[in-house]
Amino acid sequence: MNEGFYAWLAIGIYIVVGIIIAILARRKLGFGMNEFFLGNRSIGGFVSALTYAATTYSAFMMVGLAGWTYKWGVGALGFELTYLCGLVLVVFFGPRFWLVGKRFDYLTHAHLLADRYQNRAVGIVASLLCLIFLIPYAAIQVMGVGILVAGVSQGAISLLAGMVLAIVLAIVWSNIAGLRSVAWTDALQALIMLGASIAAVCFLAYKGFGGFGGFVVKMNQEIPQLLAGSGLLKFNIFFGLALPWIFFSLSNPQVTQRLFIPKSVTAFKQMIGGFLIFGFIYTIVSVLWGFGARLLIPGLENADQATPALLAHATIPWAIAIIVMIGILAAAISTINSILLTLSSMVARDIYKTGINPKAPEKRELRIGKVVIPILAVIFFLFAYWATGKTGPDFMIVRLSVAASAGLLMAVPAIIGAFFWKRATAAGALTSMVLGAILVLALQITGYKPLGWWPGVWGFIVCIVLYVVVSLMTKAPVKKAQEFISYLNKELPKRNFI
């Protein structure tokens, strides 16, 4: 059977359908930064939920998390569930983002921070933080696509071709209609990734083990060490990986930007509720997939190869394998799309207009944002191409994902303080973000883990201390803080967010 031909055929159908949807979204495209990057803050609840899910859940899940489960066991489930637990932060902070976004016309969380602290440098630093640490995270998605299509096609499609495909599609769909095309294609991609993964796990359980009952019995018999307690995952590793995940919904700009897009309170609630359901199901499916790979294909040196190896296994027919491949391809591209849009909006608004040319007309600002999209995409590709030569057991997709999130974690104290602490200052925000990020980078590059704790843990501790101490020693923007917090205290009781 010609695996390459059928893989390309499936990818071709997926591309055609995606382009049609993106073009249909363009019909409603208006003019301006809000329209291109936020869909004019008028996205319905169903599409908001699916684009939030597709943005959040990427190649990391069915490739990275499955590989993590393959290697470490049930601790991977606890690790990923910390993200869903962290969604309590969205329930609490999300309405605040949505309200101030509408009131003050914020485009990104860096834009919010610059205005709240009345300091352009805060927005610029927050944007640079995102640019630095989201590059490896976006590159992971590119790598995931390449690894996957090469594995499913049994080499008929090269890893390089798969990575090029991911970048080209991300550029095209991001440019056709901005957030509208990304949100609409995300809706398609979220349905594909969830439906394909559920179908694959059901097929795996029934054909490979005679049903889910047999699947569980087999796990208890052959890999009990992976099911006990936290599996083989030590607590300091678990905590170091999980901490950035808890705050992922506040620290990652492609996620916080989604909090600005629902058209109403009802749509906002539908977005959060739909995402919770989607996330829980997709997490369980990805973990079961990893356990299935461990049972059927033990002994893999590189756990990131668990999904490609399982899809090529005789238990999984080619049709199911190709459907899953398209689902993971969709997940990765949706995340790349979202990161491209978010980072390009930060370059245009928070670095160019806020920091360089405050009087720039919106038309020029939008043009710069669009020009930056392919430039960033090329950077993602180059980083991914470099990293593919280093994907040994200690360079796993999960580790790289969390390393990126650890750097983004340094903005969290400034974000939380912006909503609740009138005494917070720009100097506190700047010092904590800059020195916290430098510490995280230094620890990640050297591999040094003081007392066995991971870079994100130490960076977060130092970041919080610096933010509080420096803020207490410097002058706060009292007028803006009062306006910002008083507005929220007034509006929140009027809205039925719960």
Image (spheres, helix red, strand yellow):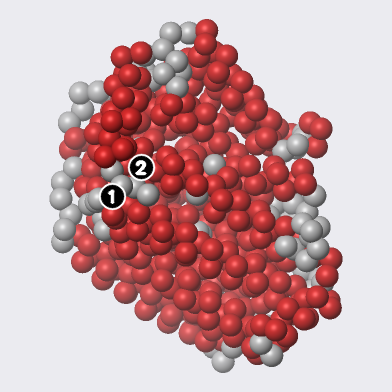
Q: Quadrant of residue 486?
A: top left
Residue 353 on image: x %, y %: 28, 28
Describe residue 305's horizontal placement relative to residue 21 as left or right.
right
Element marked by disc 2: helix
**Amino acid found under the numbered disc labelled 2:** Pro
Which of these two is toward me, 481 or 20?
A: 481
Q: Is residue 321 visible?
A: no
Q: Is residue 113 visible?
A: yes
Q: Which of the labelled discs sits on residue 95, or is there none?
A: 2
Examine the rendered structure and indicate whether residue 5 appears above or below residue 360. below
**Which residue is drawn at the image coordinates 52% and 11% (left, top)?**
472
**Which residue is drawn at the image coordinates 16% and 61% (left, top)?**
27
Examine the rendered structure and indicate whether residue 328 appears above or below residue 127. below
Describe residue 292's horizontal placement relative to residue 60 as left or right.
right
Residue 10 on image: x %, y %: 43, 80
Instruction: Report which residue position mark 1 lands on.
Output: 265
Q: Residues within 10 Å of mark 1 (few under 14, many from 20)?
A: some
Q: CA distance from mark 1 to mark 2?
A: 8 Å
Which of these two is toward me, 200 or 494?
A: 494
Q: Residues within 10 Å of mark 2 (few under 14, many from 20)?
A: many
Residues at marks 1 and 2 touching, judged by CB atoms closer than 8 Å: yes
> Which is more N-terminal, label 2 or label 1?
2
Pick the quarter of the image with the N terminus. Answer: bottom right
**Which residue is drawn at the image coordinates 39% and 32% (left, top)?**
110
Which of these two is toward me, 179 or 72?
A: 72
Describe residue 20's horizontal placement relative to residue 323 as left or right.
left
